[in-house]
């Protein structure tokens, strides 16, 4: 039985501890090159420490708050880093955890208004797995936008006072962000009856990857996984994105691997036996981007998927869905992008995460109901 990560840890939200800054009298403008360089250095040091907190590097002693942050934020980060270190120790017992972290930072925009600066950055982080074999992913990676707030001190230097990760997580947050996913809004759909029994999560060694695709189906599972590998971070500009983009992303991958769209129109977009994408949201089926609706189209109406009894039966390009609160409505959709004899690796949008271990997901969300689809 997998050890589980404490729900108390996952309930922590990553927000700055300082009070909102008062509105400056002068209008904001682009930051100077000198200020931008200082913002970048502070953010890089902070996000690197945050990522390292969940790795083996902090197993003995959680990292302290970085320099150049406000006292209030430093206090909040000490608590966060301790919780992340505990999560890292639990995951080390589950599957080896992470050895070290690499953080790359892109500054998208930096503006200054009086003694306050707002900086938009994108964090691209790799959390390395211990001793990966040649056929295994070497790391879990994620891409996460942040809004950072800085205040200028009396000596003219800047302090980081707030960090707000800019995404609504319908899926599992990046491992360094201690927060629960939100429920995906469920669009109206016809009453479909009871779902299949949720998949078992115990990894007792009795289940093996389901490697029995139908050779007559015409589906290309390597193309499905390759699509997810290519577009996990930025998305495909040929498609629009949704605020809750996980199922939209999976539908794209299925289409890339040979799933044919059905006929449909604005009048039939609520029908769960339709699956189609069009130029506008109101001319696209609910099953395309709604996790709950996708389940019914895939497993019941089209029978393009078969529900598996265990999450550990999933193979490459299979789909995993989650009902976080066991309330009967599916909230999130993911795809298997890599599979070894004892581990599956999941990729998804909202947020953008690539090759996260299935054993990590099961440990972090022990109360979720999981639905595993053989595609």
Image (cartoon, helix red, strand yellow):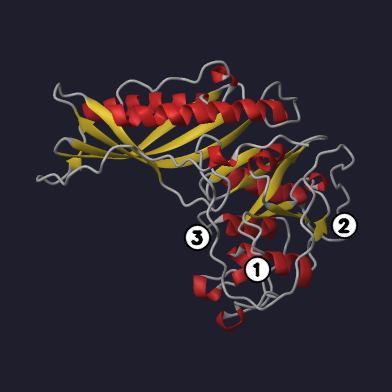
Q: Nearer the viewer, residue 207 or 316?
A: 207
- Residue 174 in view: no
**Label 3: few (<14), some (14–19) or many (≥20) C-alpha neighbours in 10 Å:** some
The residue wearing badge 3 is 242
Q: CA distance from mark 3 to mark 1?
A: 15 Å
Earlier along the polypeptide chain: callout 3 or callout 1? 3
Q: Is residue 347 above or below residue 192?
A: above
Q: Nearer the viewer, residue 24 or 126?
A: 24
Q: Nearer the viewer, residue 35 or 7?
A: 7
Q: Position of residue 321 (x, y in %)?
A: 68, 55
**Rendered image: mark on residue 293:** 1
In this rendering, the count of numbered labels is 3
Marks 1 & 2, CB-CB < 8 Å contact:
no
The residue wearing badge 2 is 214
Q: Position of residue 113 (x, y in %)?
A: 17, 41
Earlier along the polypeptide chain: callout 3 or callout 2? 2
Q: Is the C terminus in the top left, top right, bottom left or bottom right quadrant? A: bottom right
Residue drawn 18% across the image and 42% down it = 29
Q: CA distance from mark 3 to mark 2?
A: 32 Å
Q: Is residue 310 above or below residue 240?
A: above
**Label 2: few (<14), some (14–19) or many (≥20) C-alpha neighbours in 10 Å:** few
Q: Position of residue 180 (x, y in %)?
A: 54, 47
In this rendering, the label closer to the viewer, 1 or 2: 1
Marks 3 & 1, CB-CB < 8 Å contact:
no
Q: Quadrant of residue 85?
A: top right
Marks 3 & 2, CB-CB < 8 Å contact:
no
């Amino acid at each position: 039985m997998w050890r589980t990560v404490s729900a108390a840890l996952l309930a922590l939200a990553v927000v700055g501890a300082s009070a909102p800054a008062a509105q400056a009298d002068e209008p904001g403008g682009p930051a100077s090159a000198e200020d931008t360089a200082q913002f970048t250095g502070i953010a890089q040091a902070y996000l690197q420490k945050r990522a390292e907190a969940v790795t083996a590097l902090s197993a003995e002693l959680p990292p302290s708050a970085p320099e150049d942050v406000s006292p209030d934020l430093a206090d909040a980060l000490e608590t966060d880093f301790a919780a992340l270190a505990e999560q890292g120790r639990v995951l080390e017992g589950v599957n080896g955890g992470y050895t070290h972290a690499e953080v790359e930072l892109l500054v998208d925009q930096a503006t200054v208004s009086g003694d306050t600066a707002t900086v938009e950055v994108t964090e691209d982080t790799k959390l390395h797995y211990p001793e990966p074999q040649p056929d295994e992913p070497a790391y879990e990676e994620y891409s996460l936008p942040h809004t950072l707030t800085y205040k200028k001190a009396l000596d003219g230097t800047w302090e980081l006072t707030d960090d707000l990760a800019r995404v609504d997580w319908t899926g599992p947050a990046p491992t360094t962000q201690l927060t629960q996913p939100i429920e995906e809004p469920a669009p109206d759909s016809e009453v479909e009856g009871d779902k299949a029994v949720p998949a078992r999560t115990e990894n007792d060694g009795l289940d093996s990857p389901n490697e029995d695709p139908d050779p007559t189906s015409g589906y290309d599972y390597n193309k499905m996984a390759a699509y997810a590998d290519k577009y996990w971070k930025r998305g495909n500009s040929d498609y629009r994105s949704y605020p809750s983009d996980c199922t939209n992303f999976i539908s794209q991958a299925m289409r890339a691997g040979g799933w044919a769209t059905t006929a449909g129109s604005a009048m039939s977009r609520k029908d769960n036996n339709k699956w189609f994408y069009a130029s506008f949201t109101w001319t696209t089926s609910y099953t395309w981007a709604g996790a709950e609706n996708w389940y019914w189209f895939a497993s019941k109406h089209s029978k393009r998927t078969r529900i598996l009894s265990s999450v550990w039966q999933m193979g490459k390009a299979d789909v995993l869905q989650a009902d976080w609160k066991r309330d009967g409505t599916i909230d999130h959709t993911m795809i298997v992008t890599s599979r070894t004899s004892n581990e599956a690796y999941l990729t998804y949008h909202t947020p953008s995460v690539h090759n996260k271990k299935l054993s990590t997901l099961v440990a972090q969300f022990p109360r979720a109901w999981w639905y595993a689809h053989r595609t």
